[in-house]
């Protein structure tokens, strides 16, 4: 009997703005910027890359490039992505 395993993708389970906000909050709390960028990628895929890119004011390809594992998005880009995902950056 052959079984096919499907890779787990958390983006499929981020169904509401509240889900996305909680996911990003927990990721930000790790203090690891690469983890947070990866979480932004996941959340943007859950929300729809095309829609997020449109709200950010970049192309879909540019958004994918910024949020890739080797991407290095500028702070203003991160801020716009966070806003497009229904969140805001705060410091405490």
Image: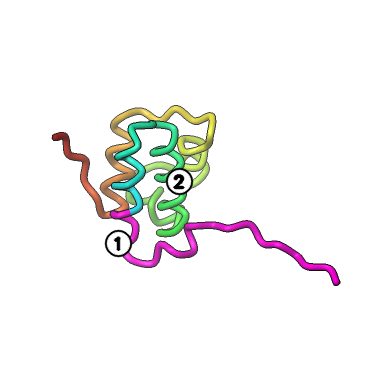
Let me know if residue 8 is in the magenta part: yes
Sequence-wise first label, 2 or 1: 1
Q: Is mark 1 on a helix, strand or loop?
A: helix
Residue 90 placement: quadrant:
top left
Measure the alpha-carbon separation of dots 2 and 1: 15 Å
Image height of 22 relative to 59, above or below: below
First to last magenta residue range: 1-22
Q: Where is residue 31 in the image (x, y as percent from the top left)?
A: 33, 32
Q: How crowded is mark 1: few (under 14 residues within 10 Å), some or many (20 or more)?
A: some
Q: What element carries label 2?
A: helix
Let me know if residue 74 is in the magenta part: no
Q: Position of residue 71 (x, y in %)?
A: 49, 30
Q: Mark 2 points at which residue?
A: 41
Residue at figure coordinates x 35%, y 28% from the top left: 74
Q: Where is residue 4 in the image (x, y as percent from the top left)?
A: 75, 65
Q: 8 or 84: which is nearer to us?
A: 8
Q: Which residue lies furthest to the right in this view?
A: 1
Q: 43 or 1: which is nearer to us?
A: 1
């Amino acid at each position: 009997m052959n079984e096919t395993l499907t890779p787990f993708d958390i983006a499929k389970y981020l169904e509401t703005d509240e889900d996305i906000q909680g996911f990003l909050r927990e990721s930000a709390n790790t203090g690891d910027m690469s983890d947070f960028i990866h979480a932004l990628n996941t959340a943007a895929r859950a929300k729809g890359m095309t829609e997020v890119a449109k709200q950010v004011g970049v192309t879909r390809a540019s958004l994918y490039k910024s949020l890739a594992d080797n991407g290095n998005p500028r702070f203003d880009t991160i801020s716009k992505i966070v806003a497009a995902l229904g969140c805001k950056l705060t410091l405490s």
